[in-house]
Amino acid sequence: MTPARSAVTAEAPLNRRHRCIFAASAGIATALAWLLYGAMAPGGFSKDTVFQLGQAQRTLPLNDWHPIAMTWTWQWLIDLTGTINSMLFMQVCAAWVCAVLTAYYLLKVSRRGWSALAGLFILFMPNTVNIVGIVWKDTHLGLALYFAVILTLLMPVVPRLRWVLAALAFGALVYGGLVRKNSAVAVLPIIALIAVWLLVRIKSKKSKEQKRTTGQKRTLSKRRRLTAAVAAAVSFAAVLVGVDTGLKASLQPTENSQFTQVMLDDLVFAVPQESIDAAAAPAAEKTRLAQAKISCADKNTERREAGKAEIIWDAYWDCYGMGANGEYTQIQDPAAVTSIWKQTMPQHLDSYAAYRIQTTTKFLFTSKLQFIRDRDRDYPAQQQMLRASLRTYVVDFGVAVFPWLFLGAVAAGLSAVGIAVGAKKRRRSPGALVVFSSAILYLMTYVPTAPANDYRYVFWPWLAAMLGWLVLWAEGQKRRRMG
């Protein structure tokens, strides 16, 4: 490698060879996206998706059981295009953009031609293509956070566009917060990095004298970084709450106290009935909880005899009797459930901790719904052979040969190791640290709330883990090149 070439920075334009490689990568990404769209059209539909589609088609009242921002988006997409395929098309296009931007980032930073192909992983890995084509809020969250992160990573690489990239990333993070409320903590490190790179790190070139800072100046610099991060987080929270409030006021959806489901699980599986009976609460709700416990016990007896896994969560659907007006509706008395939970939980912290250790262990070390089954009776695949081929690739190959690719514990482990590597002084990588931290923070929100071990809940952590390690590799190549 010549000295001139070794001095090439990430901001420098790609050379002719790398431009050709990038164009070829974009072409490959287009072909992969087209195949994914063809295999999944009109989209992967679960029971939840079908219910949400009814709202998007205005045949059902708008319901905040699923994020109204996502439902409203699907609604106007259907109005614009006249087809329900439009949401799938948007998701695949978003994945395509993320893949192409990742290929560009890796090329610019590492200057290694083949790295562009690694940047397309979101369009070919069995644990990513299985979710991109399914119309779920978890898909939207993963794509929104990924888009925001890759734009953030590009800010120092394409400094002239840093404000545009920051604005787009901020918008993507707001949308992610709207579709999944528990993503708020996962957003914080990304928001902080955007603020730091905008207000502290990305500035006009300083003179050598200005770069020689004293100890006092370093303290001030850290204070400025912290101030910028806190201000950005507060601004994000204000915008998120404002947009959410505005959407609710405008669309007026039926409201459901979904967090009550978490309390139901805790009461049914971790609190003795005698403590519930002793609580100062309506007798009717105590009776419903007692019946739910009996129902779960009976079903678990049947499951043990059949050699099936016992019910340990999701009591709303499996044992309680669901909502007062059926599926996807609020339970009869959410205030009573909340009151009973507050009264009884402090007395049973030991059983609560044991219960949540059980759910967290199952959540992290097992998975299901790695590939949504075809709902032929509702919305059959338009290309049955392509769908079958994709299922073979994901399930018969991915799940069977590499089952660890679908486990939250592995994503968490990769992220934890990534933080340890990226935090070392000579390898310090703010971008990678932020991506890995976001993954772990998001996983932590499921410790007290996990309702199931569906793979979709760990989609973003897996995207983040794979992207983070690519960032570490690319920056390592850059350090070697720069000497």
Image (cartoon, rainbow, N blue to C red):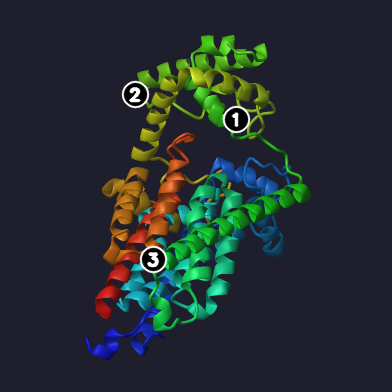
The residue that label 2 is drawn on is 307
Secondary element at tag 3:
helix
Q: Classify mark 2: helix, strand or loop.
A: loop
The residue positioned 46% from the left and 16% from the top of the image is: 297
Q: Amino acid at mark 1?
A: Thr
Query: Compared with residue 259, is residue 341 higher up or lower down, i.e. above or below?
Result: above
Q: Which residue is mark 3?
A: 215
Which numbered circle lies on residue 163? none
**Front of the two marks 3 and 1:** 3
Vertical position of residue 272 compared to residue 454: above or below = above
Task: Decide if residue 2 is on the left or right side of residue 16.
Answer: left
Residue type beneath disc 2: Gly
Mark 2: few, some, or many residues within 10 Å (few <14, many ≥20)?
few
Inter-mark Cα distance, 1 to 2? 30 Å
Find numbered disc 1 in the image and state the secondary structure of the residue it sits on.
Answer: helix
Displayed quadrant of residue 22: bottom left
* Residue marked by disc 1: 260
Name which quarter of the figure residue 352 lies in. Answer: top left
Residue pictured at 47% horizontal, 41% vertical: 445
Seen in the picture, residue 108 relative to 320 is either above or below; the reply is below
